[in-house]
């Protein structure tokens, strides 16, 4: 048996791609990537889902959460993965999926996280502070933005001359794309074992 996964995206979808690639390689035996949901109609991530033959849909505000909940139920989704999903889900939504939503954040929580810290802004803040190490965190999602229990973290060096873009790329390559597929498989395995 496999756990059914929905991946929520907003943009380029490189983290989605990392999950699809690892799944394709046979390294995620407990995960079935069943659905991709975007809150933007023009997200390139939707092309990636299509190329991989994964069902996808767009949910826009207003009504995003209602539509999303219906789709999750219809597709019998066990685990929700936020992979560059740039909107905060309400407390009411999150409470319906306790320890069944995970997120990848491009810094070492509790640094450079919470409301307003997303995408390149996170790396701009890390460079402005002058940290020598940053990284990525995969964590469960609760009602506090970036506040849920940590599943995995990986440190990445900040180098002299880094721009937000070069730092973002290094953190993706060395941390996010490695940690996220692994964490998804780990949580899916737990779900499958609990249901046995
Ligand atoms: C990733 O760096 C992800 O960690 C970050 O946005 C980027 C999405 O890239 N997410 C957040 O900042 C959430 N707070 P992708 O669309 O190529 O996966």
Image (cartoon, rainbow, N blue to C red):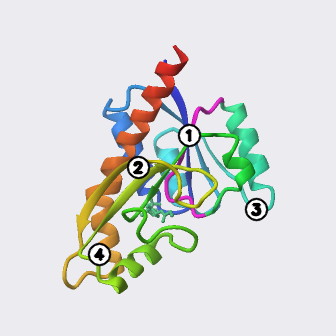
Q: Secondary structure at mark 3?
A: loop
Crowding around mark 4 (Cα neighbors within 10 Å: few <14, some 14 to 19, many 20+) is some
Crowding around mark 3 (Cα neighbors within 10 Å: few <14, some 14 to 19, many 20+) is few
The answer to whether residue 195 is above or below residue 173 is: above
Q: Which numbered dot is residue 17?
A: 2
**Which of label 2 and label 1 is nearer to you?**
1
**Residue that carries the numbered disc 4 in the rendered image:** 166
**Residue that carries the numbered disc 1 in the rendered image:** 99
First in residue order: circle 3 vs circle 4: 3
What's the magenta bit mostly, secondary-structure-wise? loop
**Residue displayed at 26% across by 81% down:** 162
Residue that sits furthest to the left in the current view:
160
Does residue 130 appear in the picture of this structure? Answer: yes
Q: Are marks 2 and 1 in contact (CB under 8 Å)?
A: no
Q: Secondary structure at mark 2?
A: helix
First in residue order: circle 3 vs circle 1: 3
Residue 155 location (% of width, % of height): 26, 60
- Front-lying residue, 1 or 102: 102
The segment highlighted magenta reads 76-86
First in residue order: circle 4 vs circle 1: 1
Mark 4–mark 1 distance (CA, rounded to whole Å): 32 Å
Residue 66 location (% of width, % of height): 79, 48
Mark 3–mark 1 distance (CA, rounded to whole Å): 24 Å
- Front-lying residue, 32 or 141: 141
First in residue order: circle 2 vs circle 3: 2
**Residue that carries the numbered disc 3 in the rendered image:** 61
Q: Secondary structure at mark 4?
A: helix
């Amino acid at each position: 048996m496999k756990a059914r996964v929905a991946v929520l995206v907003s943009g380029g979808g490189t983290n989605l791609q990392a999950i699809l690639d690892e799944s394709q390689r046979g390294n995620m035996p407990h995960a079935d990537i069943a659905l991709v949901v975007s809150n933007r109609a023009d997200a390139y991530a939707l092309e990636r889902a299509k190329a991989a033959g994964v069902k996808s849909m767009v949910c826009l505000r207003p009504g995003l959460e209602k539509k999303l909940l219906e789709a999750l139920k219809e597709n019998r989704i066990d685990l929700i993965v936020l992979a560059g999903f740039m909107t905060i889900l309400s407390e009411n939504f999150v409470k319906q999926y306790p320890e069944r939503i995970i997120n990848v954040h491009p810094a070492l929580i509790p640094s450079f996280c919470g409301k307003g810290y997303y995408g390149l802004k996170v790396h701009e803040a890390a460079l402005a502070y002058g940290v020598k190490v940053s990284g990525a965190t995969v964590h469960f999602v609760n009602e506090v933005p970036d506040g849920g229990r940590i599943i995995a973290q990986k440190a990445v060096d900040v180098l002299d001359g880094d721009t937000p873009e070069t730092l973002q790329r290094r953190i993706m390559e060395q941390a996010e794309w490695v940690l996220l597929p692994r964490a998804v498989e780990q949580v899916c395995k737990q779900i499958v074992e609990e249901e046995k």
